[in-house]
Every structure is written in C-alpha cells, then in structure tokens.
Image (tube, rainbow, N blue to C red):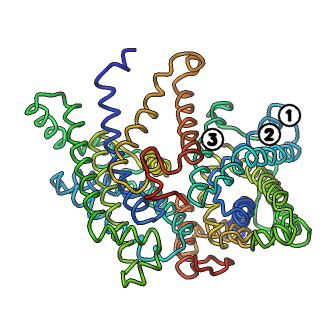
C-alpha cells in the first residue's frame, strides 16, 4: 500500500514539479506570476489530443509535437502581449491581472474550438508495470519516465549550459546582467520557450495521468502548481521541482491508512494547501527562496 | 427582442450588479485603500451564505440573526487568515488567500452533513428532505413589495441597492476619517506609516476584516436571491470578477465600485443578446464561452490602456 502511494505520489509530484518549474523560470526573470500557465498546459494537452487521437500518432510523438506547439504559443504571447505590457511599465499587479484575463481567453477559446466533452489519449489501457508491490498503469509508467527525463534535462540546462547561466543571471539581477552584455531580450525568449515546452509536457502528462480530461485540466492543477512554486520559494527553479515532488508525495501519502486512518482522498488538494500555509508560517520565503525585504 | 426589453431581465442584471457592488467593495477596501492582494474574497461570501443557510435550516435561527452570525463569522475568519499571513510578502499573501478560499470550498464540498455537499443547500437537512432556507426572506420580500406596490423583483432590486449604496457611503466616509488616511498611507509606504508609530499590522487586519464583512453581506443576499447554492458558486473565478469590477470602475475610490459593477453586469448579461451573425451561429453554451473570452479581453485591454480604471485617478492610485 505504502509503496503504491509512493509511486502515485511520484507520478503526481513530477507533473506538478515540471509545471512549477515552468512557472518559476518566467517568474524569476520577469516577476510575472503567470495565472494563464494552467491554460498553456491545457493547450498542450489538446494539441496532443489532435495528434494522438485524430491523427493516430503514438503518444510520445504527440507529446513532443504538443511541447513544440506550446512553446510557439508561449513565444507568440510574449511578442504580442507580454512585451507590449512590460513596455508600459506594468508592475506586478498589472501583469498578474493581465495573466488572469489571458487565462479566461485561452481556456474559453479551447472550449469553443475543442468542445467540453471529456478526452482520452490512445494508450494501451491493459498494460501494467509491476515494480515490487506497486502497480503502475501504462499511462502512469510513461508519465513517470518522461517526467524524470524532463526534470533531469531541465536541471542540466539550468546548471550547466550558457543559456541556463544567463537565465540565472537575469533572475538574480536583470539590469546588472544587461550591463554585463547579456542580451536580455534573447534570454527572456529562451525562458518563455523552456516554460512553454514544460507547460506542453506537463499538460500532456497530466492528461495521461487523469485518463480523461476537459478544458479545465490545467486550471484545476494551477493552484497545486502555485503551491509548489511558493513552497520552493518563488523564482527558484530547483525549489519548484522539489516543492512539486514534495507536494505530490504529501498529497498521496496523506491518504495512507496507517497514518491515523489516512485523509479522505477528496481532501488531497487541501493537504497541498495546508502544507503550503504551514511552510510559509515557518519559512516565509519558501524552502529555497532568498529572504528579501520587499 | 422580448428579453432585452423585459423589466424582469434588467432587474435581474441590476440585482446581480448590486450584490457584486457589495462583494467588490470589500476588495476595494482591502486593495484600493489598504493595498492588500486578497484573492480569496469569495471565501467570505461563501462563509456568509453558508452560515446563514445552515443556521436557518438546522437550528431554526431567525434569518436576520443568522445573517448577522454569517457576517461575524466571516470577520473572524478574516482575522484567523490575516494573523499568520499578513506578514508575508505581497505575492505570497495573494497565493495563500486563494489557497484559503479553495480549502473552504473543498471542505464545503466534502462535509455533506454540515453543508449538503456538492449537491448544495437543497441537501442541507439530509438526503430525501428538500430543504429551503429562504421562506422567511420570501415572505419579508412579499411584504416589502406589497407596501411599495411593486413586483417582488423590484423590491429585491430596491433592497439590495439600498444596502449597497449605504455601504458605499459608509466606506467613503470611513476613508475621510484619520483611520482611512492611515490606511492609505500604509498602501503608499508601509515603512513611513510605521515610523509614525502606526501599527501597520493592526490596520491591515482591520481592513481585511471589514472587506470580509462586506463579502459576507453579499453572500447573504446572493443566497436570498438565488434560493439555492452549492460550493461551486464560490470558485476563485468569482473573486476575479470582483477584481475586474474594482479595476474597471477605478481604484482607491468607493463610488467607482457600483459603476464598475453595473458595467460588468451589462457585459456579462448583455452578451446574451448577441443574436446577430456571427454570434447567431453559436448555441447558448458557446455564447457563454464568448462572454468569458470578452471579459478576459476587457481585463487585458484595461491593463494596457487604462490601468487606473474608467473613473480612477492617476493621482489617487496607479496600479503597480
């Protein structure tokens, strides 16, 4: 039972972690809490529906195409929306509210185009991976492997590559990075690309794990994702990854019967929020956040 | 064309706008005056509505008293929320307040025995017994309607707007007192206010609680107007509507809230009349999507072209 919950927690947690990292990368550089991120994910999930269900491509191919499409959307929105908004000296609040407006627009355009009916990816439903005493469905198996690869690649990108270094430099001090000759415009675009790729990936994986989903998919996950971002410390990519995994595990393990009977599974999101509030009370800047006086 | 000309429909728009005025006025106090990013305002609406309904159905409490308990409970919840979280940085506070409202919504969905669960208030008295919490209110409303010689829709419209405008006037007056000036000074520069010996934390807590009380009043009226509600009526989207109203009308002024609420009501309801091409090709659900797309575009457009709102003043407050 415990091992099974641990496995489920890793699956949920890695999806949240990927998305939280995507939110955090952009927040770190632009101080933008992107409330539309859940709907970027939904966009990715529905692009994959088109490739996987309508065109009958394998799910991994569909996922890669969906990631590319979401990255494209992400870049397009930076160019037509975010850059002009920033050019007007919009602050934290304006950006946040614009993202709320964008979330409404994106979600309901998806509703309008794709319809509200539940969707399911074509994966073999009878395939089961047995690891020790845990049983993972085919979809869960794919999700955990792909998410693991995604997290590793992201870690390498941020820590080892030139783009990753520049992103960290911008997140640390944007004007200073600009003065030192970093082409900030390009790094911002790169951040949006990575963020979009992650949104697409997390969206498809969330759709896989939930087996059936509608255009609310990303939005219903948004608050646990934000919780993970805040838990890790806003703007810290590693923090978001750790925060996401921790929340996923906390949500699943809280239902373990040995743990005082376990929490009713419908309360899993509440566990995530409660964990967030407790951590903030103890460490107001999040687990990996820098203490700042702002 | 029959709906667009009917009084019943427009009085409905008016009632909803009045309820949203009260609801959004709470956000105006918290954000427009005190600078608090409360994104969980809908929780206080839910606390007001549920407390009233539960006490009336289960404990047979008088409806005015029950409504009063709802408002007090919402204020207590605001204190409980504010005590640990008001010390957080603004962005962390914003996300914690959304989390707070979602926790309450999940609790209301799952604690069937207390709230009727996801089926809503119809289930309040237990399964198989369809329960009503607004019998006393309906008879009160009929009495008002008879005495004023108007329909019950019109009576509701008058009652809601009387309370809403009284609340607007009260908030306006409060902002002219020394207390209101301290609140605005905290919004502008917290450290400066603190250096003058003002207890910043206490002022913020009070603003949060007053906003919560206004949210609860809106919740009680919401419950009375619709005679039924469920946890889904208190989703985070409703909080964003309040924010849109406050920003639409203009920040930092009380009287702009009813204006924003009316404009919002017309955008929200008016799009039902888009029965010319290309909109006539869409069915009613699809038109609902178009409506939310429009609301999203209005929010984005406002932020781009008029961040101080229609009647806001750049001198008073510019959205950071």
Q: Residues within 10 Å of mark 3 (few under 14, many from 20)?
A: many
Residue holding disc 3: A107
Q: Name the residue at 83% across, 60% down.
A: A187
Residue holding disc 1: A56
**Res A14 visible:** no
Disc 1 and disc 2 in contact, CB within 8 angstroms:
yes
Relative to residue A212, is residue B100 depicted above or below? below
Q: Which chain hosts label 2?
A: A
Q: Choose between A284 and B120: the one closer to the eye.
A: A284
Q: Element type at marker 3?
A: helix
| Quarter assignment of residue A5 | bottom right
Report, in whole angstroms, how far the alpha carbon at label 3 lies from the one at label 2. 23 Å
Q: Element type at marker 1?
A: loop
Of the image marks 3 and 2, the number of the one nearer the N terminus: 3
Q: Are marks 1 and 3 on the same chain?
A: yes
Instruction: Tell me the quarter of the image containing the N terminus of chain B.
Output: top left
Please give the label number shown on residue A273: none
Disc 1 and disc 3 in contact, CB within 8 angstroms:
no
Of the image marks 1 and 3, the number of the one nearer the N terminus: 1
Number of on-image labels: 3
Q: Nearer the viewer, mark 1 or mark 3?
A: 3
State the residue lying farthest toward the right.
A161
Q: Name the residue at 36% across, 45% down.
A: B20
Q: Which chain hosts label 1?
A: A
> Residue B193's x, y, as percent?
41, 78
Residue holding disc 2: A122
Q: Residues within 10 Å of mark 1 (few under 14, many from 20)?
A: few
Q: Which chain hosts label 3?
A: A
Q: Residues within 10 Å of mark 2 (few under 14, many from 20)?
A: some
């Amino acid at each position: 039972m415990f091992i099974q919950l641990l496995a489920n927690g890793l699956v949920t947690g890695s999806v949240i972690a990927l998305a939280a990292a995507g939110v955090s990368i952009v927040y770190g550089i632009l101080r933008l809490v992107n409330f539309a991120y859940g709907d970027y994910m939904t966009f990715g999930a529905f692009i994959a529906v088109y490739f996987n269900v309508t065109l009958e491509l394998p799910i991994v191919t569909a996922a890669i195409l969906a990631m590319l499409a979401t990255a494209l959307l992400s870049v397009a929105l930076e160019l037509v929306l975010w850059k002009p908004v920033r050019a007007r000296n919009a602050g934290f609040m304006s950006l946040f509210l614009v993202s709320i407006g964008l979330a409404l627009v994106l979600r309901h355009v998806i509703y309008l185009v794709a319809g509200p009916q539940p969707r399911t990816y074509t994966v073999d439903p009878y395939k089961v991976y047995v690891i020790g005493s845990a049983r993972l469905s085919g979809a869960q198996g794919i999700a955990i492997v792909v998410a693991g690869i995604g997290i590793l690649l992201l870690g390498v990108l941020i820590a080892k590559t030139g783009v990753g270094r520049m992103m960290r430099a911008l997140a640390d001090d944007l004007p200073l990075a600009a003065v030192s000759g970093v082409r900030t415009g390009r790094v911002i675009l790169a951040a949006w690309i990575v963020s979009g790729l992650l949104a697409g990936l997390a969206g498809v994986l969330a759709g896989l794990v939930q087996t059936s989903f509608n255009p609310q998919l990303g939005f219903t996950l948004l608050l646990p994702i934000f919780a993970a971002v805040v838990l890790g410390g806003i703007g810290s990519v590693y923090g978001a990854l750790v925060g996401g995994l921790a929340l996923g595990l906390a949500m699943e393990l809280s239902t373990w019967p040995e743990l005082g009977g376990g929490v009713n599974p419908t309360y899993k999101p509440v566990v995530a929020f409660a964990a967030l509030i407790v951590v903030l009370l103890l460490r107001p800047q999040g687990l990996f956040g820098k203490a700042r006086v702002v | 064309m029959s709906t667009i000309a009917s009084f019943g429909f427009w009085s409905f728009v008016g009632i909803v706008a009045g309820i949203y005025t009260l609801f959004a006025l709470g956000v105006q106090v918290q954000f427009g005056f005190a600078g608090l990013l409360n994104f969980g305002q809908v929780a206080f609406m839910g606390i007001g509505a549920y407390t009233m309904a539960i006490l009336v159905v289960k404990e047979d409490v008088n409806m005015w008293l029950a409504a009063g308990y709802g408002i007090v409970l919402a204020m207590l919840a605001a204190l409980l929320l504010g005590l640990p979280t008001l010390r957080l940085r603004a962005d962390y506070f914003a996300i914690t307040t959304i989390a707070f409202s979602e926790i309450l919504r999940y609790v209301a969905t799952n604690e069937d025995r207390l709230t009727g669960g996801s089926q809503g208030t119809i289930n309040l008295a237990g399964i198989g017994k369809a329960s009503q919490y607004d019998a006393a209110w309906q008879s009160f409303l009929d009495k008002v309607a008879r005495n004023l010689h108007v329909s019950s829709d019109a009576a509701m419209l008058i009652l809601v707007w009387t309370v809403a405008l009284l609340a607007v006037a009260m908030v306006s007056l409060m902002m002219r007192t020394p207390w209101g000036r301290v609140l605005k000074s905290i919004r502008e520069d917290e450290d400066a206010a603190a250096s003058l010996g003002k207890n910043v934390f206490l002022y913020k807590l009070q603003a949060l609680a007053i906003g919560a009380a206004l949210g609860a009043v809106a919740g009680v009226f919401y419950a009375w107007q619709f005679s039924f509600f469920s946890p889904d009526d208190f989703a985070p989207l409703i909080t964003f509507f309040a924010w849109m109203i406050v920003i639409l009308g203009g920040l930092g002024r009380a009287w702009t809230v009813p204006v924003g609420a009316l404009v919002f009501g017309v955008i929200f309801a008016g799009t039902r009349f888009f029965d010319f091409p290309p909109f006539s090709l869409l069915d009613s659900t699809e038109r609902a999507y178009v409506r939310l797309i429009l609301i999203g575009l209005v929010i984005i457009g406002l932020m781009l072209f008029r961040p101080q709102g229609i009647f806001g003043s750049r001198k008073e407050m510019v959205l950071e």
